[in-house]
Amino acid sequence: MLPVALLCVWVGGYAFLLLVAVACLLLVSEWTTMCGRGITTVSGFAMMTVIAAAAVCGGLGLPAIGLLLVLAGTVAAAMGAGFNLALGFPYLGLAAVAVSWLRADPDAGLANTLFILTLIWASDVGAYMIGRLVGGKKMVPSISPGKTWSGAAGGLLCAVLAGLAAAACLSSGYSPSHVVALTIVLGIISQAGDLLESALKRHFGVKDSGSIIPGHGGLLDRLDALLAVAPVAALLALTAGRGVVLWR
């Protein structure tokens, strides 16, 4: 799956929008299944349509419309389908709009998207490896029994190193202090997204969000950090302005 995803990220345009749309379909399917509804129900199909459409709006340079669709979906679900389904709209929809809008920047979109993906993957791998090697005190055993403070520190260190390497490869002339500060913030958010998804699975009473990836669970289990990081990265990109990399 990774080579296909990276190819779509590299190509951008409609290829990336298609990747995001397919991801939205799978994510909504997992979410609605955990809610006890499924994507084939009216509410499940509506959720999938709204979030996919919101992602497309973000990729076409219309993020405000995408956010309005997410808001409308949240309100409608809260009034008719219940809290659990309503929660899924901002949780999945904000990230869908953010990541598609972020990549759509013709000048800095590829660099910014690769940057956040690199630090997320480095954080995940570093947290797993250091946590397994060092062990130690658990972070929040009531939510995620396997996560340790040593793993969190290792993941953050790996995210910083990966962020510095990515910035060096993706741009000429950058401030290492800016990169370190940015990767620390996004690295912490990445790990918080992982913990949030663990809390959500406990809320729904499931071990994994799905079974689409053998040995790893569902797509929500793999993209939990991105769901948290993407909206923050998009907000930073909006503040910096189009065509500017996040770490400048």
Image (cartoon, rainbow, N blue to C red):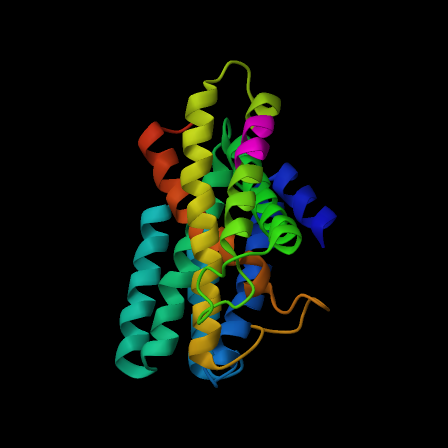
Residue drawn at (53%, 79%) of the image: 206
Quarter of the image where one finds residue 135: bottom right
Viewer-nearest residue: 33 or 21: 33
Q: Residue 27 location, x and y as percent? A: 53, 66
Q: Is 112 above or below relative to 90?
A: above
Total marks drawn? 0
Residue drawn at (54%, 73%) of the image: 30
Q: Is residue 150 visible?
A: yes
Task: State whether the magenta stretch is mostly helix, strand or loop.
Answer: helix
Viewer-nearest residue: 133 or 15: 133
Q: Is 190 above or below relative to 194?
A: above
Q: Is residue 147 left or right of residue 58?
A: right
Q: Is residue 246 visible?
A: no
Q: Residue 65 location, x and y as percent? A: 33, 52
Q: Is 220 above or below relative to 105?
A: below
Magenta part of the protein: which range?
Answer: 160-166
Viewer-nearest residue: 158 or 10: 158
User: Is residue 47 highlighted in magenta?
Assistant: no
Quarter of the image with the C terminus in it: top left
Residue drawn at (48%, 85%) of the image: 37
Quarter of the image where one finds residue 94: bottom left
Quarter of the image with the N terminus in it: bottom right
Q: Residue 215 location, x and y as percent? A: 71, 68
Q: Is 52 above or below relative to 179?
A: below
Viewer-nearest residue: 214 or 110: 214
Name the residue furthest top: 173
Q: Residue 77 location, x and y as percent? A: 32, 76
